[in-house]
Amino acid sequence: MRTPKPQIAHFTSPLYLDSGRILEPFELAYETYGTLNTDKSNAILVAHAFSGSHHAAGIYEGENKAGWWNDLIGSGKGIDTDHFFVICINALGSCYGSTCALSPQNQGAIPYRLKFPVITIPDIVRSQKVLLASLGIDKLKAVIGGSMGGMIALSFAKLYPKCAEHIIALATTHATSDYVIAVHKIMCDAITKDPRFKAGNYLISELAELPLAGLALARMIGYLQYLSPRAMQRKFNHRYVDSDGLYELFGRFEVSRYLDYNAQSFCRYFDPLCYLYLAKALCIYDLSLGHENLEDATKEFHSCIHLIAFSDDTMFPPYEMWRIKQALQYNNKPHTFHEVQSQTGHDSFLVEVPLFEHYIKHILAA
Amino acid sequence: MRTPKPQIAHFTSPLYLDSGRILEPFELAYETYGTLNTDKSNAILVAHAFSGSHHAAGIYEGENKAGWWNDLIGSGKGIDTDHFFVICINALGSCYGSTCALSPQNQGAIPYRLKFPVITIPDIVRSQKVLLASLGIDKLKAVIGGSMGGMIALSFAKLYPKCAEHIIALATTHATSDYVIAVHKIMCDAITKDPRFKAGNYLISELAELPLAGLALARMIGYLQYLSPRAMQRKFNHRYVDSDGLYELFGRFEVSRYLDYNAQSFCRYFDPLCYLYLAKALCIYDLSLGHENLEDATKEFHSCIHLIAFSDDTMFPPYEMWRIKQALQYNNKPHTFHEVQSQTGHDSFLVEVPLFEHYIKHILAA
């Protein structure tokens, strides 16, 4: 694959948000892989998860780390860039180049911060549809995403029923559970109670001024959901960083060191305000909003819906995805459901690609 | 039941700790229910969980809230105080009257704080054995406890194999998993990163000076383990505190309000330093420590071991308790194992007493 090149699309038309507010102008950062064919019929939209970005595949020049779904997207891979034109867009509200709480308001120089409007998953979908239209793409082969990306994919099926042939949603849900809402409430508290948060008015350009203690806590709380208990046990097996530290109050287990390391590296690139806004979008996500129930909410679905759940996902357990299957079945909508046996937990959709890529390959070959 | 009366036992003999340090003198707060018979053969030791106290049953004068296991302990109840003399001791290191990090060191006036020694579950057991001896009790009908209390009960079986006829351990494990270690690492970080923590030198007498933001976060992280996701869903069902707040960044769901309320009330009585010390004790708990494996660690067990696990306990899942059963089976040790079908999660041992009290009644009647 060629070196991916992030791009920024600038839109001057207003984006009408679920909250009643308007975003105007707005920008979206995105990346593409593969080549759009002449009749523009081979495009696949990939939607990223909470902390992801538009950098889904390939390796930037001078870097070592590949995009977050590099195992799945590429020449000859599950999403084959020899056949498909893949586009991944940084979600509105995220901190990788799309309009977010750090963006200047009213085309001035002062960032929105807490004046940024609440963004919903449908808002993210609408903004991405605008970008697709600007590229002349009005039909998609598929929309694919895991976790929050799965919410985006399912919301796409609801907002634009005839736009995508296939919707592939992994490790996600029809409505965020109270448990996951509780997790995000605590994460957000960790950030806002950090004295450096200063009601969102922290100095963005100074690392030492950011509420990173809170952000690190939030990220670590996330890890409790992303990795399954069994995966942690396999990985760390009670090992102590320094066996002499067993009887020292602050002696550390390997799992603690792992959490520290990962939280610190997360803090180098993620923004606390964006964390709050994305958490809000995730928490108020509910496909049934404005409908009697999920059956009613899915009755206009037209795409073929493919649901891939992971057996030990504690964040979005298979029974929540099964609920979507029930609603689709009730409405006689075309769908498939796969429960992948995994031992990695929620993160399986990112790190256990060999366990499910054949499903995706098969769907896209149809 | 008569109004329970908390008592303090003072010991001047040294307590030799696993860390190599010595606690001298030390105190233990405790409560008793029922009457010790003349041959002192009807005593039952009840061990409390992480945030529990010696106030296991009855209601203090002028208060409304009963002890934490009031559903189980009392006249005619699962642990029948008409027949048994029940004693519950505040764990060493906890903040309800037993010696802890807030106690004065060297009989002076200055509290230990971070100079307090690391306490282990076996240390807690040894201290409780000293108290039992001081009451002239050298044989117990049973040791019963859930969660951390279950660790105490199982460690009792290991340290004093011939002391208790029955050991009843609920919702617990043979060794704290990396997942639970991770949970407690984040809780402890929340406390120590609170600027008010001041390396443990916060002003104890001033509520406004305590690192309560961190302690509240820690408690909320705990709730993610104590209640099962399904229990949260049943309890809150996506309800919003104020439906107008759906599109406000800090609008709250009912589950968030519940977490806030409970964390705030927890902060009124629990101490941050004690939290750290008990978390440490819980994290380094491992029945196999100093042994080849769990089979080796349990080979001298002599009490009849009763294991009661809860189907949806995500903190100490049934398969961890099953591991204890395997080891006991391997050694031909008398034991029973029950997996209670519950939908409340880890807290089932506290709030779902009707689901398991018949097991306990049956064991004690034998």
Image (cartoon, coloured by chain):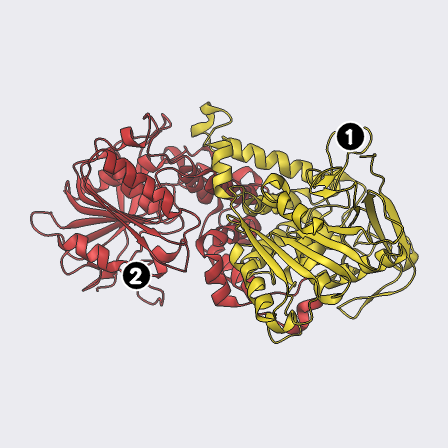
Chain colours: A yellow, B red
Structural distance between the alpha carbons of marks 2 and 1: 57 Å
- Asked whether the viewer can see residue B316, the reply is yes
Looking at the rendered structure, the kind of residue marked 1 is Glu
Q: Give how far across and how far down residue B224 sits, in percent.
A: 50, 53
Q: Quadrant of the N terminus of chain B?
A: bottom left
The residue beneath circle 2 is B355
A233 or B208, which lies in front?
Answer: A233
Q: Residues within 10 Å of mark 2 (few under 14, many from 20)?
A: some
- Whether labels 2 and 1 belong to a single chain: the reply is no
**Contact? badges 2 and 1 (CB < 8 Å):** no
Q: Give how far across and how far down residue B42 sits, in percent.
A: 13, 50
- Chain for disc number 1: A
Looking at the rendered structure, the kind of residue marked 2 is Leu
Determine which quarter of the picture holds residue A110.
bottom right
**In the rendered view, does A300 fall on the left or right side of B51?**
right
Q: Residues within 10 Å of mark 1 (few under 14, many from 20)?
A: few
Secondary structure at numbered mark 1? loop
Circle count: 2
**In the rendered view, does A189 fall on the left or right side of B129?**
right
- Chain for disc number 2: B
Q: Nearer the viewer, mark 2 or mark 1?
A: 1
Please tell me which residue is depicted at 62% across the width and 41% down the height of the picture. Answer: A353
Outermost residue on the left side: it is B38
B279 or B361, which lies in front?
Answer: B361
Please tell me which residue is depicted at 79% across the width and 66% down the height of the picture. Answer: A17
The residue beneath circle 1 is A63
Please tell me which residue is depicted at 62% across the width and 60% down the height of the picture. Answer: A335
